[in-house]
Amino acid sequence: MNRILFATDGSDSAKAASRYVKSLLDAFAECKLVVLTVKQPMPMVEGFGFPGEPVIDLSNEPSEAIKESVEEDFAQYRDRMNFVSVTGHPAVTICEEAENQHADLIVVGSHGRSAVDRLLLGSVSNGVVHRSKIPVLVVK
């Protein structure tokens, strides 16, 4: 294994997944880590803005907080780590970025939502599993 993409939103489930990522990095000493945060674009509200206008991104602060937390948590792997932050639909963007980064494995946390919650809110981990062309490790 050469490269792991760890998609995190800073949640408790992502923190649980980070333990598995560390185990994999210990097992594969040459493996690189890509830490990905995905910012969702603000939807265009009818009557405001024009089609084709750039999406307003107000979510930089959480990404910085997540980055600082991950840097602290993965301090011993700092030389093997790269941070990427992109804007888009989380499940689709995670899969696209995994391909762009030539990842061998995607690791994501699962929030453990009920079927009704998944229906209403969607499930990023479920979307990644169904879209990915590479193996996905989902951690509860």
Image (spheres, grey):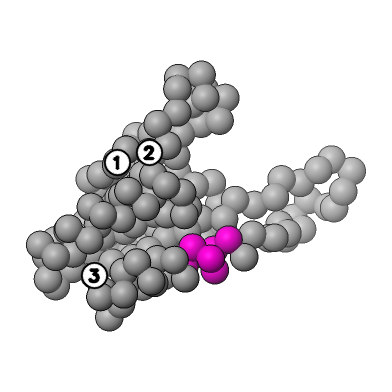
| Helix, strand or loop at mark 1 | strand
Q: Residue at x 18, y 64 (%)?
A: 25
The boundaries of the magenta stretch are 62-67
Q: CA distance from mark 3 to mark 2?
A: 23 Å
In the image, residue 136 lies in the stretch drawn in magenta: no
Q: Residue at x 85, y 53 (%)?
A: 49
Estimate the x, y position of residue 88 in percent, counting from the top left: 55, 52
Amino acid type of the residue tagged 3 in the rendering: Lys
Task: Indicate whether 123 appears above or below 80.
Answer: above
In the image, residue 63 lies in the stretch drawn in magenta: yes
| Helix, strand or loop at mark 2 | loop
Q: CA distance from mark 3 to mark 1?
A: 19 Å
The residue carrying mark 1 is 138
Task: Indicate whether 11 appears above or below 58.
Answer: above
Q: CA distance from mark 1 to mark 2?
A: 6 Å
Residue 134 visible to an observer of this rendering: yes
As rendered, which of 60 and 40 lies closer to the eye? 60
Point out the tag, 1 or 2, that comes first from the N-terminus.
2
Point out the tag, 3 or 2, that comes first from the N-terminus.
3
The residue carrying mark 2 is 110
The residue carrying mark 3 is 32
Q: Main secondary structure of the magenta part?
A: helix
Q: Residue at x 25, y 44 (%)?
A: 137
- Residue 36 found in image quarter: bottom left
| Helix, strand or loop at mark 3 | strand
Amino acid type of the residue tagged 1 in the rendering: Val
Estimate the x, y position of residue 122 in percent, counting from the top left: 51, 31
